[in-house]
């Protein structure tokens, strides 16, 4: 066991995290892929985005809990390439909490009255499997 | 693995530390905890982001919003508005050149820049080896050890046209080949991080922002020349650099990226830190080696050069921090890729630290051959308070002083010497028309008189005499004869001094006499300082 402060990894894994030796190029590549998941957020570019309405109306309607549920669901499924971000009130306060899912190459989809359970379902169905959950979509146009 | 929806990068370069970024970081962490956001927003201290005069600087991702001059009292607002509610706090995103949202790809201050050396500075967490690996770290070393012969590595560096960035501009590949061809039981790699040139702080910020790139490059150099040990000679004052490099060495060793049998190739390489005691002359490679051996930091006659007779008399490669930081990208992308930057004669980029009378002070990296005008007016935002540009000194105190007529000269290691100046290590001191040339010359010469090690006569006596004469001129007691003596003395020092210190100390004086001779004459003839700086 090596007691080295490995920065972020130590924070995550606790002090007793055993540092694995990198002996082959393949191992380096594996660590690189893993580590890139941690920094992808800073790279921008085309990726799936979940936008949560966090105006006062959204927060009052429980957007904080919705956001936490989304984050938890993504972490549980080990999904690293989705960006979760917030926005202010978009003027549909009665529909809050509102979340919008933007996937590259497709129309954005806004869901209304998203409870924690609905949020988990949307992550599973829409973000993971690409199936829009039609019944909760806010009709537009 | 934990999922974070937002990363807040707090610039942790020394200039921002001085502005209080640590307190801002702690306040951010505290505020995030208070609002229960600490599980979803990650705060990362990075290396220097560049715009040092705007510190403390923070960048919020995924939006890529840059907040400048952040005070502890601004933190609750940023956390509540931006990180909780997702509304950018526009009153804190700065004005002028950094106005509005700065996207990740093209922040305004990065538009004309090319970042090779600073590729990770301000973007990754320098205390995390994983983040370095995420941005292709240690892949160049892996490529060398598993796919390339040592001579191939040297060949790539030679073909890339990389020259030493410490100031002397010696071809790096050629330097390596001398040591590679030398026959010895032990060879060494030394990273020269004794950045002593006043106004230069690029090496410090590279070490602080991306320590692993230096360690990786040293291991590559070790493989190329057949060395198994490396030393990073860092100025003792650079506390954060020393800490980060030491931490990096520990991490790399723990992962087997330094130490024995790296990547199962049979190649072993170890690095340790040696602290300098702050003598300017110890940036000279032989004086540096003397200091490492425990002797007085003094240069000695060359040849033999360190490439064959260096540390402990063994073949030694001494490379500057910035030179080394170029190595991993060159290995990964190839020599032709590198030659695509800069000029055909002098490929690549140069890191500059901009200081003095300029709107945006800080760290920049630009292609070789860029003009001074572009750097000052496009990246630097011009001269403050509408004053006129008077002169720029490139390369630190021992560099030449360029007047406004030289604003359009391409800056590289070959063109500037032809103009009697030097690109040097990368300090860029800008002065407006409120400064007196004679007064500036006096302060420069005082510096050299104090820093001369005293070993050779031309430098010991020369720097002292130069200072005396210029001081006399500044007090209004000079004569035309003094100007002639200054020129003769400068010429003699350039030809006869033992090392770079004595040879380059007269460069500022000579360029000042050449371009601002009338100002010296005004001090003699009219006993008048045109800017009113000198007390005559």
Image: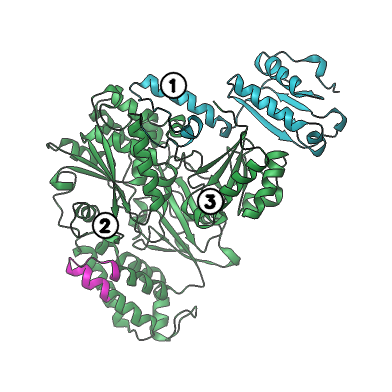
Chain colours: A cyan, B green
Tags 3 and 1 both on a single chain: no
Q: CA distance from mark 3 to mark 1?
A: 33 Å
Q: Earlier in the sequence, mark 3 or mark 2?
A: 3
Whether residue B337 is in magenta: the answer is no
Q: Is residue B311 left or right of residue B37?
A: left
Q: Are marks 3 and 1 in contact (CB under 8 Å)?
A: no
**Mark 1 element type:** helix
Q: Is residue B205 left or right of residue B153?
A: right
Q: Is residue B316 above or below residue B91?
A: above
Label 1 lies in what chain? A
Q: Is residue B499 above or below residue A32?
A: below
Residue B46: horizontal and vertical position, in percent?
50, 43
Tags 3 and 2 both on a single chain: yes
Q: CA distance from mark 3 to mark 2?
A: 32 Å
Q: Which numbered marker is on residue B282?
A: 2
Residue B1: horizontal and vertical position, in percent?
54, 25
Label 3 lies in what chain? B
Residue B177 in which image quadrant: top left
Whether residue B457 is in magenta: the answer is yes
Q: Is residue A32 left or right of residue B23?
A: left
Q: Nearer the viewer, residue B292 or A103?
A: B292
Residue drawn 44% across the image and 81% down it: B534
Looking at the image, can residue A133 be seen? Answer: yes
Residue drawn 65% across the image and 37% down it: B37
Nearer the observer: mark 3 or 2; the answer is 3
Nearer the observer: mark 3 or 1; the answer is 3
Looking at the image, can residue B93 be seen? Answer: no
Please provide the residue range marked out in magenta: B449-465
Residue under pointer 1:
A30
């Amino acid at each position: 066991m090596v007691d080295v402060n490995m920065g972020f990894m130590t924070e995550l894994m606790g002090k007793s995290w055993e540092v694995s030796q990198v002996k082959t190029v393949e191992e380096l590549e594996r660590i690189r892929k893993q580590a890139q998941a941690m920094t992808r957020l800073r790279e921008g570019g085309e990726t799936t985005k979940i936008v949560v309405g966090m105006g006062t109306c959204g927060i009052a309607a429980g957007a904080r809990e919705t956001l936490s549920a989304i984050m938890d669901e993504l972490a549980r499924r080990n999904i690293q390439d989705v960006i979760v971000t917030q926005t202010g009130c978009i003027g549909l306060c009665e529909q809050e909490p509102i979340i919008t899912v933007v996937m590259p190459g497709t129309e954005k989809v806004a869901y209304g009255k998203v409870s924690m359970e609905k949020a988990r379902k949307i992550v599973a169905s829409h973000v993971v499997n690409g199936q829009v959950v039609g019944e909760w979509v806010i009709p537009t146009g | 693995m934990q999922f974070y929806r937002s990363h807040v990068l707090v610039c942790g370069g020394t200039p921002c530390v001085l502005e209080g970024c640590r307190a801002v970081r702690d306040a951010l962490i505290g505020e995030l905890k208070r609002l229960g956001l600490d599980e979803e927003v990650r705060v990362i201290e990075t290396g220097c982001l560049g715009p040092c005069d705007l510190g403390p600087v923070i960048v919020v991702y995924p939006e890529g919003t840059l907040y400048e001059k952040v005070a502890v009292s601004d933190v609750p607002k940023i956390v509540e508005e931006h990180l909780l509610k997702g509304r950018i706090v526009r009153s804190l995103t700065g004005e002028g050149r950094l106005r509005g949202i700065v996207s990740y790809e093209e922040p305004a201050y990065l538009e004309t820049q090319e970042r090779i050396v600073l590729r990770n500075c301000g973007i990754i967490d320098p205390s995390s080896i994983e983040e370095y690996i995420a941005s292709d770290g240690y892949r160049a070393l892996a490529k060398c050890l598993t796919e390339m012969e040592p001579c191939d590595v040297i060949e790539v560096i030679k073909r890339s046209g990389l020259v030493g960035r410490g100031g002397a501009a010696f071809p790096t590949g050629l330097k390596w080949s001398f040591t590679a061809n030398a026959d010895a039981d032990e060879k060494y790699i030394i990273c020269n991080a004794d950045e002593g040139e006043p106004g230069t702080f690029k090496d410090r910020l590279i070490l602080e922002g991306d320590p692993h790139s230096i360690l990786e490059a040293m291991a590559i150099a070790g493989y190329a020349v057949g060395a198994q040990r490396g030393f990073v000679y860092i100025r003792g004052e650079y506390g954060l650099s020393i800490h980060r490099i030491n931490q990096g060495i520990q991490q790399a060793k723990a992962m087997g990226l330094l130490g024995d049998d790296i990547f199962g190739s049979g190649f072993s390489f170890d690095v340790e830190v040696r602290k300098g005691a702050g003598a300017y002359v110890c940036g000279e490679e032989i004086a540096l080696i003397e200091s490492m051996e425990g002797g007085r930091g003094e240069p000695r006659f060359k040849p033999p050069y360190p490439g064959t007779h260096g540390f402990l008399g063994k073949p030694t490669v001494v490379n500057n921090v910035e030179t080394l930081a170029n190595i991993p990208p060159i290995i990964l992308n190839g020599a032709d890729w590198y030659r695509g930057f800069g000029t055909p004669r002098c490929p690549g980029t140069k890191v500059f630290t901009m200081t003095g009378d300029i709107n945006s002070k800080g760290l920049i990296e630009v292609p070789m051959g860029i003009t001074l005008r572009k750097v000052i007016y496009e990246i630097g935002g011009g001269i403050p308070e509408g004053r006129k540009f008077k002169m720029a000194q490139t390369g630190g105190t021992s560099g030449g002083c360029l007047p406004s007529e030289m604003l359009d000269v391409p800056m590289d290691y070959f063109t500037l010497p032809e103009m009697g100046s030097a690109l040097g290590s990368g300090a860029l001191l800008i002065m407006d028309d409120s400064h007196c040339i004679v007064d500036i010359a006096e302060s420069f010469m005082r510096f050299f008189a104090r820093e001369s090690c005293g070993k050779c006569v031309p430098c010991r006596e020369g720097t002292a005499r130069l200072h005396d004469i210029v001081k006399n001129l500044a007090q209004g007691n000079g004569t035309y004869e003094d100007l002639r003596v200054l020129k003769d003395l400068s010429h003699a020092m350039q030809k006869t001094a033992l090392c770079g210190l004595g040879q380059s100390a007269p460069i500022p004086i000579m360029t000042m006499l050449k371009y601002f001779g009338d100002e010296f004459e005004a001090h003699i003839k009219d006993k008048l300082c045109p800017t009113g700086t000198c007390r005559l």
